[in-house]
Image (cartoon, grey):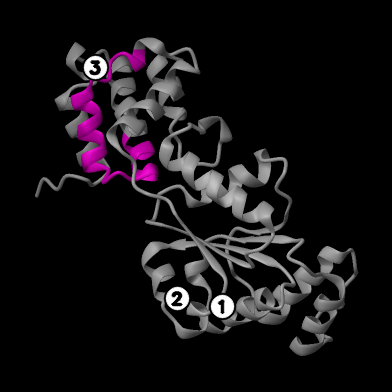
Amino acid sequence: MNQFAVAKELFSDDFDLGGYFDSLTFEYAKKSLVDAITAHDTPLIFVLGNPGSGKSFLLNFITKKVKNVKVAKYFTHPYFDDKEFLEILLSLAGKNVERNVHTTEALISHLKRNFSNLEYTIFIDEAQLLTEEQVELIRILSDQKIFQFVLAMHKKEGHYILQKDHFKSRTTRLIEIESLQDHEVARYIEHRLISNNLSELASMFKRSHIKFINTYAKRNFRTTKKFTKTLFEIMNIAEKEDLGKSFKKVNYKTLTMSAIDIGLIDVK
């Protein structure tokens, strides 16, 4: 396998924690979230960011790598009805919960007897998919300090929820993941390659190349990974097909081809 083939796999859109890099953007969000969780004084924490900004990666990183944070339950997608949700939470107490037996009110009463003081932290990713009724249920549970909830959602929907009257008067914490700056993208690509013994490839990226990637990727973490993976895929094909040298370098030609391939430049 040539070095381009190896490099492209490093930028797959997954939760490989080996892809972590200490950008100021990510570090600030991580520290803010860890501090808010470990203080145990904020029942409802919102993590907001544009699609692909790294919200899921952040939750996954904290769940698996931050030892002083104990996440009782991580819902990667909020596909559940109210009673199912409450039954899952009640099972955290080590109880065998009979399904579809108790009313919603009875389940909440059981939770109050078993949990208190925000001791347990619940992560809910893609929380913009929650219904208004589900959001209200989470608000009730957090108001009574049964659980501490961290809701990760798209920025637009998150601000919409926070503007509602019954959230304005509540104790909440807002953490926003900002867009990546050029130097952060440069450090991410460099770190990913050098840490995998591909320093020769890392040296191919000039400041103008990084600016091109970040501009067309719209400073988005997920799109940046997709862009970089596609770039190395083009160079990998050029290597296998023994195409010209210009296709085996990071340059305006290969960057443009990559942007076109993933739909960032419309050639119509």
Whole-percent x, y for residue 7 in the image:
42, 22
Q: Which residues are magenta?
A: 201-227
Disc nearest the viewer among 2 and 3:
2
Going by the numbered disc 2, the residue's amino acid type is: Ile
| Label whose residue precedes the other's in the sequence (2 or 1) | 1
Find residue 266 and name its label.
Answer: none
**Residue at the spot of label 3:** 249
Disc nearest the viewer among 3 and 1:
1
* Residue 102 seen by the camera: yes
Going by the numbered disc 3, the residue's amino acid type is: Lys
**Residue at the spot of label 1:** 135
Farthest left residue in view: 268
Q: CA distance from mark 3 to mark 1?
A: 49 Å
Going by the numbered disc 1, the residue's amino acid type is: Val
Q: Secondary structure at mark 1?
A: helix
Find out whether residue 22 is within the magenta segment. Answer: no
Near mark 3 (Cα within 10 A), the count class, few <14, some 14-19 or many ≥20, is: some
| Label whose residue precedes the other's in the sequence (2 or 3) | 2
* Callouts 3 and 1 close, C-beta under 8 Å: no
In the rendered image of this protein, does residue 245 appear above or below residue 259? above
Whole-percent x, y for residue 209 in the image:
22, 26
Q: Secondary structure at mark 2?
A: helix
Residue drawn at point x = 56 percent, y = 36 percent: 16
Corner quadrant of residue 49:
bottom left
Residue drawn at point x = 78 percent, y = 74 percent: 87
In the rendered image of this protein, does residue 175 appear above or below residue 235? below
**Residue at the spot of label 2:** 161
